[in-house]
Image: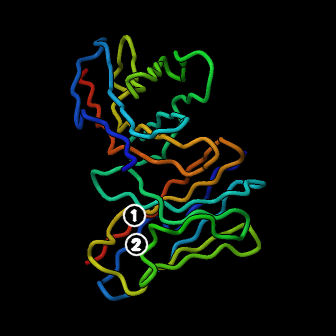
C-alpha cells in the first residue's frame, strides 16, 4: 500500500543543534514532495517542495531537504535550530497527475532554549 | 491574498448530534479538499472537489459524513450523527495547480 513514513515521532533538541527529520515514501511512480510545519494553534504552512530538478531544495526559515530517489527519502534538515522552530512537521506526497496530498504522521520538534 | 477561511474554530457536541463546518477557499482556486486530522496523526483526505464536482470521496464515511460545494466556491462538511471517534481537527484546503493553502481548521470534540 502507498504510504508516507516519518520515523521520528518526537525530537528534542537544544538551540543551535542541527536537525534532520526523516521521511520515506512508498510510491512506485513519480512523486512531488512537500514539508509542512504546524506551529501550535496555527494552520499548516509550506516549508518547501520538490517537483523536479535539483534534488537539494531550499525552503523558508533556513530549512532544506534532499530528495534521494534510490532511497525513496526526502529528509528535512536545518543546520542550527531555534526555540521558535518548536512545532509539528509533516512530510507529504502527491503522485504526478494527482492533486491529493498524502501526509505522514508528523514529527513533533521541541527546541529547548 | 486572503487565506482559506473556516468556521467555526471550535465545536463541542454530544454523540449522535449533528454538526456542520464551513469553508471559503481562496478566490480562483478550483480544487478544494477536506482533511481530518486526529490527534497524533497526519491529515487524512476525506473529500476532494474540482469546482463543484467530487473528484475523490473514497475515504469519506458516507453513512454519516456528507459534503457539498455550491457553485464551485464555498463548501460545507456535515456529520450526522457524530461519534466519539469523529473528534478531530477538520481542515479545509484549496489549491491552484500545485500550490496548496490550508485553513486554520475546526476542532471538533464529541462527548
- Marks 1 & 2 on one chain: yes
**SS assignment at label 2:** strand
As drawn, A42 above or below A20: below
- On the picture, is A27 further left or further right than B88? right
Mark 1 is surrounded, within 10 Å at the Cα level, by few (under 14), some (14 to 19) or many (20 or more) other residues, namely: many
Disc 2 chain ID: B
Instruction: For the N terminus of chain B, give its image quadrant.
Output: top right
As drawn, B25 above or below B111: above
Instruction: For the C terminus of chain B, give its image quadrant.
Output: bottom left
- On the picture, is B3 further left or further right than A69? right
Q: Residue at x 45, y 46 (%)?
A: A42
- On the picture, is A7 further left or further right than B77? left
Q: Position of residue A62 (x, y in %)?
A: 48, 17
**SS assignment at label 1:** strand
Q: Which residue is mark 2?
A: B11
Q: CA distance from mark 1 to mark 2?
A: 6 Å
Point out which mark residue B107 bears.
1
Q: Position of residue A14 (x, y in %)?
A: 23, 18
Exactly how many numbered labels are in the figure?
A: 2
Amino acid at each position: 500500500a502507498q504510504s508516507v513514513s516519518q520515523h521520528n515521532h518526537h525530537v528534542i533538541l537544544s538551540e543551535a543543534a542541527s536537525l534532520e527529520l526523516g521521511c520515506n515514501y512508498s510510491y512506485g511512480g513519480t512523486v512531488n514532495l512537500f514539508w509542512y510545519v504546524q506551529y501550535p494553534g496555527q494552520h499548516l504552512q509550506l516549508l518547501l517542495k520538490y517537483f523536479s530538478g535539483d534534488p537539494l531544495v531550499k525552503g523558508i526559515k533556513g530549512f532544506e531537504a534532499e530528495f534521494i530517489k534510490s532511497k525513496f527519502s526526502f529528509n528535512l534538515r536545518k543546520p542550527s535550530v531555534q526555540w521558535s522552530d518548536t512545532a509539528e512537521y509533516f512530510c507529504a506526497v502527491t503522485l504526478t497527475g494527482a492533486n491529493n496530498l498524502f501526509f505522514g504522521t508528523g514529527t513533533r520538534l521541541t527546541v529547548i532554549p | 491574498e486572503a487565506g482559506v477561511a473556516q468556521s467555526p474554530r471550535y465545536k463541542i457536541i454530544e454523540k449522535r448530534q449533528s454538526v456542520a463546518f464551513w469553508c471559503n477557499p481562496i478566490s480562483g482556486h478550483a480544487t478544494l479538499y477536506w482533511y481530518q486530522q486526529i490527534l497524533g496523526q497526519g491529515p487524512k483526505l476525506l473529500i476532494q472537489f474540482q469546482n463543484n464536482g467530487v473528484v475523490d470521496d473514497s475515504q469519506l464515511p458516507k453513512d454519516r459524513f456528507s459534503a457539498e460545494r455550491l457553485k464551485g466556491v464555498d463548501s460545507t462538511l456535515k456529520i450526522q450523527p457524530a461519534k466519539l471517534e469523529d473528534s478531530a481537527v477538520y481542515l479545509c484546503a484549496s489549491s491552484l495547480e500545485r500550490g496548496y493553502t490550508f485553513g486554520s481548521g475546526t476542532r471538533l470534540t464529541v462527548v
